[in-house]
Image (tube, rainbow, N blue to C red):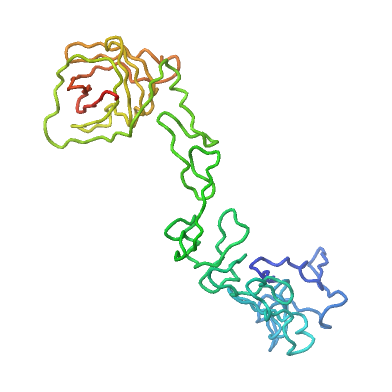
Amino acid sequence: MLRYAAGRHGQRGKGIAAVPCVWMVATALAPLFAWAEGCSSAESPRYCSSDLECRSGEACGTTDCVGVFQCLPAQCVCQSGPDFISVPGDACLHASGSPPRCNCDNATCAQPFDSCGELSCVSLCQVGELCTADLVCKEGTSCLILSGRPGGTCRPSMCKLKLPLLPPFCGSKDAPCGEECCQPDCVGRQCGEDPNCHLSCGVCEPNNFCSSDRQCRLDPNVLLCEGDLRIAGPEIPIEVVDGGPMPIAEGGTIADGIYDLVATRQYVPSSFLHTFVRAAMRLFAGATKAELIFEGTGFTALYGPHELIDVAAEGTTLRLAPTCPTYSTGTLTIGNMTLGYSVVGSELWLIQPGQVEVYAPRP
């Protein structure tokens, strides 16, 4: 079985085509190899897969770390490792003790090429110096190339684990990964992540979603019913009340106007309760009509977020009957509901079994 040398930069060699003095003639039985005119040794090549197949004083390899492995004088076999490469070259086969064909005697960080013009000289650049590949940086450092940059800078290897670079690992002269931080690119984006740093380009308003082109679009279900009521204010967390009696519905006179959800208190937590993350309600026509808009949570997230409702007050009870959207639109609604209610100062409290929602007049 033939072995092939890896390329100088960790790539596989190009097989037989990479050895200028070797070609393969295919037959029905097996491949035959022959040296072409101009080869560096008069002896036919002896291909190998390990040193055990070679004679004393020989090793299995190539002279330049590229091509098909052969038995060669041990001193002429190319040696390489994570941070070095020794390339004796074909000249070693003609004269024992000849200097390596390629060397890095004159290589610098700015010109990290060996005498053959290959990028094979390692550990030339200090922290902070410009680079194009990891191998030119000193041990323990790597070539850190930021998005959108043609080249990089030698920095501690741990900086590659911190990408995208953000303070405190960058942003100052004393920062371990340098002064330059990742620069987000949110041009033309209202929401979603930027392509450079994967940071947020913004959050859409309630009842809007982030489209594939990173623009905030109004949920089309909001437009199924008439009215321009929109949510205002932050998300409302559920307050679990531990102990104490649950308020009793007391009724009262409900004033027309816009009310925002300001609190949700659960005395008996349950996943079957109607709960909203945000909500606003406009009562009109003597509080006999309502426009409701909300962001749901749990199963209420499946409901149409904008509804028109008939409201009937009977003592301490409110009967709600949605009129829009209709089932013909294929959109779910909160459905007919009977709630207890109390007017507490200027607030409207809607009471379900185990839960109280508090709505306050919008300023």
Residue at position x 41%, y 19% from top? 228
Pick the quarter of the image with the C terminus: top left
Would residue 15 appear left or right of 338 to someone viewing this image? right
Q: Nearer the viewer, residue 242 or 159?
A: 159
User: Residue 340: x and y, percent?
Assistant: 20, 19
- For the view shown, which residue lies furthest in the right direction? 37
Residue at position x 22%, y 11% from top? 313
User: Residue 42: x and y, percent?
Assistant: 84, 83
Residue 295 higher or lower than 114, as above or below: above
Q: Nearer the viewer, residue 87 or 39?
A: 87
Q: Which quarter of the picture shows residue 188? A: top right
Residue 323 higher or lower than 235, as above or below: above
Residue 294 higher or lower than 131, as above or below: above
Pick the quarter of the image with the N terminus: bottom right
User: Residue 318: x and y, percent?
Assistant: 23, 15
Q: Which quarter of the picture shows residue 104? A: bottom right
Residue at position x 75%, y 84% from top? 92
Would residue 96 appear left or right of 137 to someone viewing this image? right
Q: Nearer the viewer, residue 345 or 296?
A: 345
User: Residue 360: x and y, percent?
Assistant: 25, 25
Residue 78 higher or lower than 241, as above or below: below
Q: Nearer the viewer, residue 112 or 77?
A: 112
| Number of callouts | 0
